[in-house]
Image (tube, rainbow, N blue to C red):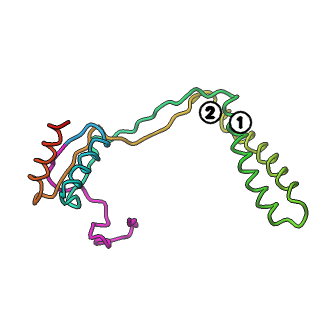
Amino acid sequence: MTTATPFATGTNSTGVNALPTPPTGWPIGSYATYEEAQRAVDHLADNDFPVADVTIVGIEPMIVERVTGRLTWGRVLGAGAASGAWFGLFVGLLLGLFSTGGALAPIVTGLVVGTVFGLAGAAIRYSAQRGRRDFASTTQLVAGRYDVLSHPRSAERGKEMLTALAWRS
């Protein structure tokens, strides 16, 4: 896997253009979910189709925010304390490894200080929102549909194979 840089020009080691470019190819299938598009490409691969000619393209991108629960002071402070405690424990363990005295004191100190700072940080962040966002959520970038494109030299064969797959399903 290669990563393009903002200043890359030409093609990378795999022969793929390093700059963002629109996809090319002929559509050979369209699917409601990414999982279905993956299954289609997997079917092509299992049947010796040149999958290097295939691209999955997400059409009509959208940001989906799924609410996972209500935030309360108890949940916010509990999560802040837990997060701070883990970080404090980590720092305390590091200090304990390199201290000349006993290892227990830095670990306990790190745990206590981390918990206090985690509580304080969570309380400050949550109170700054003033009740405008009393819920937790996760965000995903998804597409309205997923098209499978193929290089024109093998598009007809790919379309036939995916049609046969659809008839079997």
Q: Residue at x 46, y 39 (%)?
A: 139
Disc 2 on helix, strand or loop? Answer: loop
Q: Which residue is at 17% across, 42% downward?
A: 165
- Report which quarter residue 50 is drawn in: bottom left
Numbered disc 1: secondary structure: helix
Residue 6 in percent (x, y) is at 39, 66
Three-letter amino acid code at the position of disc 2: Gln
Q: Which residue is mark 2?
A: 129
Give the position of the N terminus as an image quadrant.
bottom left
Give the total of numbered labels. 2
Tell me, for residue 123, which label it has, or none. Answer: 1
Q: Residue at x 75, y 40 (%)?
A: 120
Q: Mark 2 or mark 1, which has the lower sequence index?
A: 1
Mark closer to the observer (2, 1): 1
Q: Is residue 132 magenta?
A: no
- Front residue of this view, candidates 131 and 68: 68
Principal secondary structure, stretch drawn in magenta = loop
Q: Tag 2: Cα neighbours inside 10 Å, few (<14), some, or many (≥20)?
A: few
Q: Quadrant of the C terminus?
A: top left
Q: Would you place residue 13 above or below residue 139 in this image?
A: below
Q: Amino acid at mark 1?
A: Ala
Residue 49 place in picture, x, y as percent: 18, 57
Asked if the stretch drawn in magenta spans residue 27, the answer is: yes
Give the percent coordinates (x, y) of residue 34.
Answer: 31, 43
Q: Which residues are magenta?
A: 1-29
Is 50 on the left-hand or right-hand side of 109? left
